[in-house]
Image: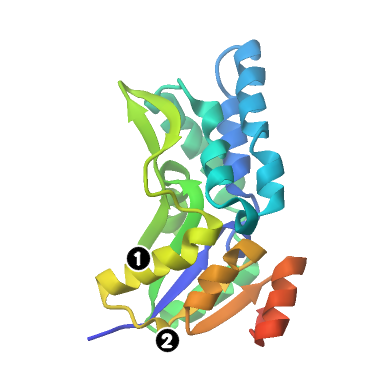
Amino acid sequence: MTHAAAFFRVEGTLVRPPALAAAAYLAANASGLGERFARLGNVALALPLAMAGELQTGSTATRMTWMGVRGMSEDRLRVLSDEYFEKYLRDEVLEVGEGLLKKAKKAGQRIVFISDGIDWVVQPLGKQLGADDLICNRLEVRKDKATGRLEDPVVGGNLSGQWARSFAADNGIDLEKSFAYGASAADSLLLSAIGKPCAVNPDRQLRRIAKDHDWPVVER
């Protein structure tokens, strides 16, 4: 028996800050002023790629985003991740996204969050909003310290459609009956993979794509 799901791209649909903001926060709170500057410099390397968009850069920007946390202890990163959630995510859920989420739950759809962020940051949000499943990245940790690399396979904007199809195949989800919500051009491949796509507060590129494909657009 197959079921319908609702796939929510976390960044832009449910909360405003991109994954890059969380990575910068973690790096900025490293011990020592010089170390902070060095780590933020590493995170900044990902900015041009992130601005170019995942459609052009693949998972490269996503991988580079977390280079700034290399060498930080797992315990410290977990504490900072909790702090970031409390300061910037917990009380900042977008009204439009929360409304769509409530509608999906009422319809009995399986709630799936997809994020470029790391699990330590996104898991509390998933718990708060009642997500059934969370597809996100995980930092590689060796000897209790982050290596600055993400564990494979990496979740990135242009790979979200691939993740959705794989998840559906493994969990008995009917993609044609399912919904997907995205906010940026990088989400277009996720939206294309799902039977009932919807652009939420879309950027200019996604707005154009949505118009070309006659996808509904929700703004608030």
126 versus 83 height, above or below = below
Category of crowding for the residue at label 1, using alpha-carbon neighbours closer than 10 angstroms: few (below 14), some (14–19), many (at least 20):
few
Name the residue type under label 2: Glu
Q: Position of residue 169 (x, y in %)?
A: 29, 73
Q: Image check: 65 left or right of 171?
A: right
Q: Which residue is mark 1?
A: 132
Q: Quadrant of residue 149?
A: top left
Q: Quadrant of residue 200?
A: bottom right
Quick one: SS at disc 1?
Answer: loop
Q: Is residue 10 visible?
A: yes
Residue at 43 percent across and 82 percent down: it is 178
The C terminus is located in which quarter? bottom right
Quick one: SS at disc 2?
Answer: helix
Q: Which residue is mark 2?
A: 176
The numbered disc on residue 57 is none
Q: Position of residue 25 (x, y in %)?
A: 60, 33
In-front residue for pair 147/13:
147
Category of crowding for the residue at label 2, using alpha-carbon neighbours closer than 10 angstroms: few (below 14), some (14–19), many (at least 20):
few
66 versus 142 height, above or below = below
Residue at 38 percent across and 71 percent down: it is 165
